[in-house]
Image (cartoon, rainbow, N blue to C red):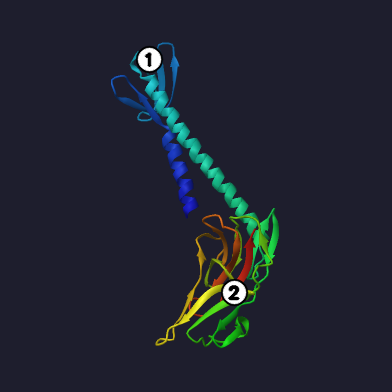
Amino acid sequence: MRKLLFVLLVFVFTLSAANFKLYLKDGSFQLVREYRIEGDRVKYYSIDRSDWDELPADLVDLKRTEAEAGARKSAIDKLKQADEEEKEAAREIRQEILKIPRDPGAYRLEDGKLRIFPAAEGTVHDSKGRNILRAISRLPVIDGKATLETPGEHAKEVVTDTSPEFFLQLSDLENFGIVKLTPRKGVRIVERITTEALSKEIIEEHDKVEIFTQQLSENGLYKIWPQNPLPKGEYAVVEYTEGKVNTQIWDFRIE
């Protein structure tokens, strides 16, 4: 719909700009499609009369007429350039989409080549110990506070681009984003988990990175990238449902 409106805008603007005002020195004007100077006469095609007419050249304000016509042409050229840039961007996106697998996961295109990020293991750690997230068939029973961790103090996957673009194919209609991980001895903390004593509601807190998102397909393919360059450190692309402790993790580090 947005693309259609843009094309219609260009079309309507072009039609209206094709007709312009032939200004007279008394301040009035004739709406014309074109004009030409022949000796001491200005011949023009009148929009009102749908026919050619003419005026003495000394009655016509050619400077004002040419200035406005030039401004209109410049505006049309800018619209056409913007349209071409949008078409080129759409072509590039289509080519990118063709390279991304439909299997759920996180991906990057680096120099046109596909890079697949392996899913990282998640472990819920509370006062009773550690439980591997993928082995939990229902909501874990968490005693007060806990953390969701992933093994190792550093991710194996290294990204050198500080404004990396990721393609994320969701496995379900869930929340997603980029989070900063907090290194601890032997692990990195993905999120902090709190269970409300009375309601037993589970609250999950991530150190979220502000991102831009672009939906690329109806079946859950998104392109995401940080709004600001990422400092060196540990990060992850995540997919999750609030309050379900079901976070999927694709970790990486910026170097």
Give me the residue at 37% from left, 23% from top: 64
State the quadrant of the C terminus.
Answer: bottom right
Q: Is residue 13 above or below residue 214?
A: above
Q: Amino acid at mark 1?
A: Ala
How far apart in space, not on screen, are marks 2 and 1 (Cα)?
A: 76 Å
Q: Secondary structure at mark 1?
A: helix
Q: Secondary structure at mark 2?
A: strand
Front residue of 255/87: it is 255
Residue 106 placed where, x, y %? 63, 66
Q: Is residue 19 visible?
A: yes
Which of the 4 image quadrants contains residue 20? top left
Q: Choose the circle earlier in sequence order: 2 or 1.
A: 1
How would you rate the neighbour count of disc 2 (Cα within 10 Å): few for under 14, some for 14-19, many for 20 or more?
A: many
Give me the residue at 32% from left, 25% from top: 29
Disc number for residue 34: none
Q: Amino acid at mark 2?
A: Gln
Front residue of 60/189: it is 189
79 left or right, relative to 99:
left
Residue for badge 1 = 57
Residue for badge 2 = 248
Residue 165 placed where, x, y %? 60, 58
Which of the 4 image quadrants contains residue 55? top left
Residue 160 placed where, x, y %? 65, 56
Residue 184 placed where, x, y %? 59, 73
- Of tags 2 and 1, the one toward the viewer is 2
Q: Is residue 93 above or below residue 131?
A: above
Q: Point out the residue furthest to the top here.
A: 39
Which of the 4 image quadrants contains residue 223? bottom right
